[in-house]
Amino acid sequence: MPYTAHTPSEVKEMLEVIGLQSEDELFSPIPNEAKAKAFDIPDGLDEWSAFDSFKELSKKNKVDKICFMGGGYYDHIIPSAVDALAGRSEFYTAYTPYQAEASQGTLQALYEYQSLACELSGMEISNASLYDGGTALAEAALMSVRITRRNKILIDGGVNPEYIKIIKTYLSFRDIEFEVIENIKDSSDIEKLKSKIDENIASYIFQNPNFFGSVQDFSEIVDILHSHKALAVMSSYPISLGILQDGGSLDVDIFCADGQSLGNYLNFGGPSFGMLATKQKYIRDVPGRIIGKTLDKNNKEMFVLTMQAREQHIRRHRATSNICTNQNLLALRATIFLSMLGKNGLVDMANMNYQKSEYLKSELSKIDGIDIYNDNPTFNEFIISTPKLATKLIDELNKKDFLLGVNMSKIYDGFDNKVLIATTEKRTKKEIDSLVNAIREVL
Amino acid sequence: MNSKTIFEKSQENRVGIKLPPLDVDTSPILPEYLRRKAKAKLPELSEFDVIRHFTNLSSKNFSIDKNFYPLGSCTMKYNPKIIEKIASLEGFSSLHPHLITNDEEDSVQGALEVIDDLQNYLCEITGMEAFTTTPQAGAHGEMLGMMLIDSYHKEKNNKQKKYVIIPDSSHGTNPATVTMIGYKVITIKSDENGYMDFEEFKKKMNDEVAAVMLTVPNTLGIFNKKIKDLCDIAHEYDALMYYDGANMNAILGVVRPGDIGFDVMHINVHKTFATPHGGGGPGSGPVGVNHKLKEFLPDLGIYKKDDKYFFNKNMENSIGKISPFFGNYGISLRAIAYMKILGKEGMQNASKKAVLNANYILARLKPYFDVPYDMICMHECVLSAKSLKKKYEVSAMDIAKYLIDFNLHAPTVYFPLTVPEAIMIEPTETENKQSIDEFCDKMIEAVKLAETNPKEFLNYPKTLGVCRPDDTRAIKELDVRSIH
């Protein structure tokens, strides 16, 4: 199926204007030695055959199970209005807002996104989004090195392991030192951490709630970091901020989060988007796009890309980052989602996640043989230890149509019988009870 | 025009979402010291308030569905609607990524087939040996490419390697990426034909050069005739050739970077393969390599055995991870769906018509504008408003602001940096002759206006509600969030 409109007579007419005889001549600047040696691509499909074949393919993915899986990616509500608005072709098929007058819709929406990100995180400023939560943390690490001119990063062992791997890759190619401070059970090793913080540390990256689901108070650590002029970088879970301490009141320097939970689909891990918010004084070191409000020549308010002197298309090799795209469409979805959720809705939703998870926790702890691994309070996920190997338990629950959770034995040594289980506002009491019964049956 | 923000429309205690019921017995709340002190000041609106607000905002945007959008280097082509229908299938969109952590291959066979299909198509289209879909954008692909190059030289103990050669016409992401991975940039100027200066290149080429990064065709829309020689010379010094695939749309089925001798490349699938740009993302920038770099690819791969897909997580020499899981999988899905619909002829036809459209624009506008490099161009052409600026003080930006007043998105202006008053036009293949003619007519009218009433340009655009932002004020009186 071609999506071109040229009729044969139009092609002829256009070639005449150009002064060529055939379309092949258009490629005459390409020498023979550079021509393709093969191009063995199947014939194209009509859209109905294509849809049928992809529909068949999609059925090979098992998505019909009741989802208790989290680990940074959650099965939250997505209002229909989010799809409807973000799907509007005026948003969907626009490009980066280079011509401000022709892009006020995107620009204002992103300005609103930045404002919402600041409210949510408690921080002073936000960029217009990055690729995802993991790469945002890696960018924050680099940012902390630029700001402090120091070369070592400490990473809390409770940070999402997928993110730690990304940060490690980013840092190792820049010869920046890093050390992961392993947890003691589900808690940060505060004493070890204290002994490591000195004048060489650029920043310490922690996550709250951490990957084990545990909620901790990091305010003491933030103070210690600041007394050594090191930065605190926080990785967060946006929905939890309805009830959990925000980055601003903790006085962290850089706040990051993955935005999947804010109105975005799971998408097998991507696309999602990354949040990065910080203090105003660090704005020149922020990677990615920033939108600002200004006046036009007639003193009317309008929105523009601003602080562009940081960026690659202006500064080239001196840029703060090579980032060009933001994840605009996903950030737009979050903007719509948060606008609908509102001040009280966010608190209610966070509370509901907490309450449903606590209910599941208490029901599970009634089962002989099941222990709750977390010593700390949790938000909406926690780890269970069972008499069965995690792999086996997950498999057996799979057969009963439950997606039980993240198999921690695949990530950490000594976690052979541990599973990370999450509950969102979407899980009903009935579903939770049936999970508890199913677990009871297989144990 | 009403530009009230969503915060200004907020009314206390208005509700936009009815949450599912809290149907469980409640537990004590979290201890005080862990809890948030003040509520986040999110706006309070009804669903309909939100619908109306964002629908109105959307109407302030130009988009490819509504407007001719010839932004050079951005490949704004039509995105077929069926692609979104496919991507919205629940079996694709609701898949949890930790199924990968859990090694639950049986639950994700469809997704893995999507990735495998895309990698195979990309290999065939580019002539590379292996692809990874993990980079989340073109620039992210460049970063991965440089990491692979660095790993190659480290493995070979090529300690002296510290430079990367880049032509002055390159995208800004190229030098920014090189610095990010700890190399220094050697910039080579363009010669009178718009090619990277060949003699200068030979002079600068030595054992300390780790790689040469080229965009082909380059940002001037020009195909470098000596491309094979450049590859051969670089390889003599064990420098690797990096292909920036931002402009692949020009050469589908005509040129394959792998066949010429490029070692590593990225391809912006959101450009060439019509996934929506979404106002600046999401994108996806898969990276392809030849045998030299295959072992270093990010450590989540897939392989097929007895008709079943498995995860490959034990890649000994891998550089590690640069993104979660398989990167922007949703974009990979859209790209392969588009490829399958287009097929061989469709792809070849796309490049032909993209190049035809660009050359037609060049031919029509040549009498009216400066043409820095007058030759057959590829998918885009670069004009200059240098003479208009000199004679009438009408700049490339003035032309841009004039065009948008007539519902035509402006071309890219002031890029490439090597062309003064650059106007870079990429029509893409999906534009018909009539819209291209309309654009050319308007460009010619702009020249006529410059000749007769140049001062009038300062009033454009007239009909979009706002006109010419004060960018200096935006920085000096920084306002990057609503305070309410």
Image: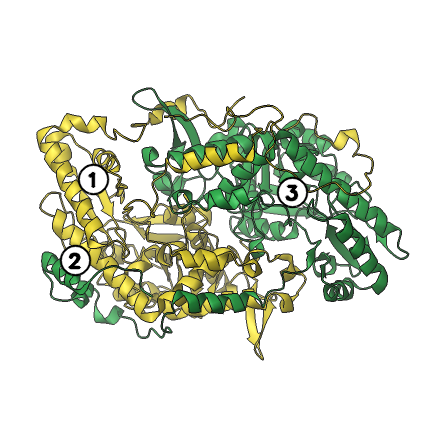
Color scheme of the displayed model? by chain
Between B484 and B395, the one lying in front of the other is: B484
Q: On what subunit does the disc labeled 2 rest?
A: B
Q: Amino acid at mark 3?
A: Leu
**Mark 3 — residue?**
A154
Residue B229 screen position, x and y as percent: 26, 65
Q: On what subunit does the disc labeled 1 rest?
A: B
Between B185 and B66, the one lying in front of the other is: B66
Q: Residues within 10 Å of mark 1 (few under 14, many from 20)?
A: some
Establish if B357 lies above or below B41: below
Residue A71 screen position, x and y as percent: 67, 51
Q: Residue at x 38, y 57 (%)?
A: B80
State left or right for residue B1 relative to residue B153.
left
Q: On what subunit does the disc labeled 3 rest?
A: A
Establish if B55 lies above or below B134: above
**Mark 2 — residue?**
B376
Q: Residue at x 26, y 70 (%)?
A: A35
2 or 1: tag closer to the N-terminus: 2
Q: Amino acid at mark 2?
A: Ile
Q: Rounded to the nearest whole Å, what is the CA distance between mark 2 and mark 1? A: 20 Å
Q: Nearer the viewer, mark 1 or mark 3?
A: 1
Quadrant of the image occupied by residue B31: top right
**Mark 1 — residue?**
B420
Q: Rounded to the nearest whole Å, what is the CA distance between mark 1 and mark 3? A: 47 Å
Q: Quadrant of the N terminus of chain A?
A: bottom left
State left or right for residue A387 relative to residue A114.
right
Q: Which chain is yellow?
A: B
Q: Amino acid at mark 1?
A: Pro
Residue A278 screen position, x and y as percent: 55, 32
Total number of numbered labels? 3
Q: Quadrant of the C terminus of chain A?
A: bottom right
Q: Which chain is green?
A: A
